[in-house]
Image (cartoon, rainbow, N blue to C red):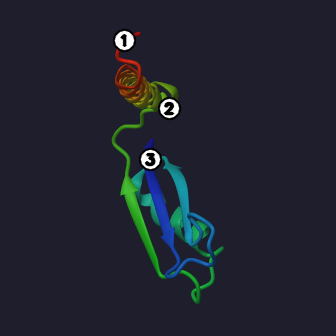
């Protein structure tokens, strides 16, 4: 079983929608010779007036990503930065209060 990714591209997109003008199709064929027929089948749904480019990628490995794990690293760094900002804010306030009330 051969796996491919087909990227169809429309120049200029179609509006302000993110990803508009792009289409991604996952293709599985028994053998490489079947690929041309499958590509024709998928591309004929597009008008020649709108389809500017088609790119095919052969997939050698497919792996699902754990999105929560990827974002967790950024979230932890963001929390660390926010905590440091809070400490800095409190230290500035403490300094201001000490200057205002030196005998307290």
Q: Residue at x 41, y 19 (%)?
A: 101
Q: Residue furthest bottom?
A: 49
What whole-number distance in Å separates the C-alpha atoms at marks 2 and 3? 23 Å
Residue 63 falls in image quadrant: top left
Q: Which residue was labeled with disc 2?
A: 67
Q: Secondary structure at mark 2?
A: helix
Instruction: Estimate the spatial distance between the alpha carbons at disc 1 and disc 2, rounded to whole Å.
Output: 54 Å
Quarter of the image where the C terminus is located: top left
Q: Residues within 10 Å of mark 3 (few under 14, many from 20)?
A: some
Read off the residue under disc 3.
3
- Give x and y (percent) for residue 64: 47, 32
Whichever of callouts 1 and 2 sits on the residue coming sooner in the sequence is 2
The local secondary structure at tag 3 comes to strand
Q: Disc 3 or 1, which lies upstream in sequence?
A: 3
Q: Nearer the viewer, residue 98 or 19?
A: 98
* SS category of the residue bearing label 1: loop
Q: Nearer the viewer, residue 94 or 16?
A: 94
Q: How many neighbours does mark 1 have within 10 angstroms: few (below 14), some (14-19), or many (20 or more)?
A: few
Q: As displayed, is residue 51 above or below residue 6?
A: below
Alpha carbon separation for disc pair 3 and 1: 76 Å
Please state the horizontal and vertical placement of residue 91, each as a whole percent of the image: 36, 22
Choose between 12 and 94: the one closer to the eye. 94
Residue at the outermost front position: 103
**Dot 3 and dot 1 residues touching (CB under 8 Å):** no
Q: Which image quarter holds the N terminus?
A: top left
Answer with left or right where residue 26 lies relative to residue 89: right
Q: Position of residue 99 (x, y in %)?
A: 34, 25
What residue did someone put label 1 on?
103
Q: Sequence order check: which comes first, mark 2 or mark 3?
A: 3
């Amino acid at each position: 079983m051969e796996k491919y990714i087909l990227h169809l591209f429309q120049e200029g997109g179609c509006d302000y929608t993110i990803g508009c003008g792009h289409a991604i199709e996952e293709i599985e064929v028994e053998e490489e010779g079947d690929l041309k027929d499958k590509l024709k089948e998928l591309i004929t749904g597009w008008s020649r007036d709108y389809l500017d480019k088609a790119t095919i990628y052969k997939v050698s490995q497919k792996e699902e990503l754990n999105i929560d794990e990827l974002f967790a690293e950024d979230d932890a760094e963001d929390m660390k930065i926010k905590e440091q900002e809070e400490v800095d804010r409190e230290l500035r306030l403490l300094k201001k209060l000490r200057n205002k009330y030196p005998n307290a």
